[in-house]
Image (tube, coloured by chain):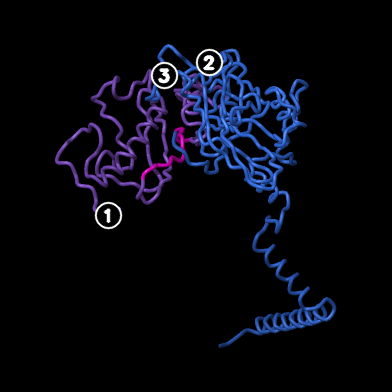
Chain colours: A blue, B purple
Amino acid sequence: MRVSESTRRFLINWAVMFALIATILMLSGVSLFSWFGEKTVLALFAAWWYASQNPGKVLFRADQRIEQILANLNVSVETPHTKPAPASATHDIAEHPSAIAERALRRAGLNPDDLPVQLSDIGLLVYRGGKRADSIARDEAIATDATHVRPFIRVNFPLKQNGGDTIRFQLIDDKGKIRYNDENWYDLTPGDNYLVTKTWLPISTLNGEAPDGGWKLRVVVGETPFAVHLFRWQQSRRHEVRSRLTSDGEIDERWQAPTDKGNPLSLDELLSDQPPAARTTARRQ
Amino acid sequence: MPAWWGTRNNVSPRLRLEVEAMRAAFGDTFRLNVPKWDPLYWEGIVEINLKGIPQREHVLKIMYPNEYPHRPPEAYVPNPRIYSEKHQFEDGQLCLFNPKDGTNYGWNPARSTSVTVAGWAIQWLYAYYTWRVTGEWPGTEERVNKPPKPPSKW
């Protein structure tokens, strides 16, 4: 193959430059190995390679992991990305569960200091269609869009041997009518015991009416009233809509969605409380 | 012609009603998707509580046609892929009612909502799996010709 003089010179120049660069890199590598040790150099090289393969990706972000763990626990936390709305002046600060439990004991006519068993928490698990509780309600109002509720208590059993008793959980409405009654034998072990009823109160069975006003959760151990916890309901628009739907999902022709012509609603506002695009818990209602 | 659901800045009362009805009936199970050009659709996962089926979780898609509510929403099951020789169109759309049934038993533009269609679609899934096992489609159905036999395997 015939090569022109200029091409030959160009190729020789490139070959010399390549040889020089290769020599410099080899010498640099040998120097780095001798100064920092081979493990350090290899680790730095691996990090550089990973970063070059994943542009924009950070190797480890502690806040992401913490958010993930809290998300799994259904706990919210203030982060730079999701700052909660500032609390209004009228917002109640949640009381400690033990203070609420103590009041429930006193309402039942008991003195917490005289009891061998300590009640440290009382309230209701609130469900909105799923198999897992959506929230725990102690002194917070329960929105009437809940599908069902389950009472619970947490008691500390100080004795060293196991025990147990028949415990009755009752939900009593604002007119004094018992709307739910669950009676079961519960085994108690030394230490903390979370007792959750095996049944629940479906809100939809309340004759289509949303529960209203102040209700009571009464806990009776054997034949002795043990705790009386007060809670209240908060009316939800979702419950009102549900009551206007037939079993076929049809609406009353006379009923229309609220139209506030003076204050148009944007699509973003309408869907502001919609869950994120990620797969939600599968359920059928 | 404006879309039946209004605009991004001012949604129609009908869409507000649809969203409220879906939330009231199904909670957060379904999510309304708003593509830039294509029609609005609900998508959610429903669990079919039957033993022996290959997959219990089914993705259900309820798509609003542009002529809504004069035409009913269309229902699809994108996952798992289902092909039924009965009561399903070639593009996968579920055949949920007979237009001959009229507004009392079929789609009623004034009363029916996407909740109605989602409920029918869930019933359709139960009927489909029952048909695969028993060879009988539960409930009343429109028989056009000789009914096809269900496939012997899943």
Q: Residue furthest bottom?
A: A1
Confirm whether circles 2 and 3 share one chain: yes
- Left or right: residue B94 versus residue A11 is left
Label 3 to label 1, Cα distance in Å?
A: 41 Å
The chain ID associated with circle 1 is B
Q: Which residue is mark 1?
A: B153
**Which of the 4 image quarters holds residue A43?**
bottom right
Residue A8 against residue B45 in the figure, above or below: below
At x 27%, y 54%, the residue is B153
* Position of residue A127 measured from the top left corner of the image (x, y, whole percent): 55, 33
Is A218 or B153 nearer to us in this picture? Answer: A218
Q: Amino acid at mark 1?
A: Lys
Q: Which residue is mark 3?
A: A251
Q: Which residues are magenta?
A: B37-50
Q: Which element is circle 1 on?
A: loop
The numbered mark at residue B124 is none
- Left or right: residue B146 versus residue A70 is left
Q: Which residue is mark 2?
A: A258
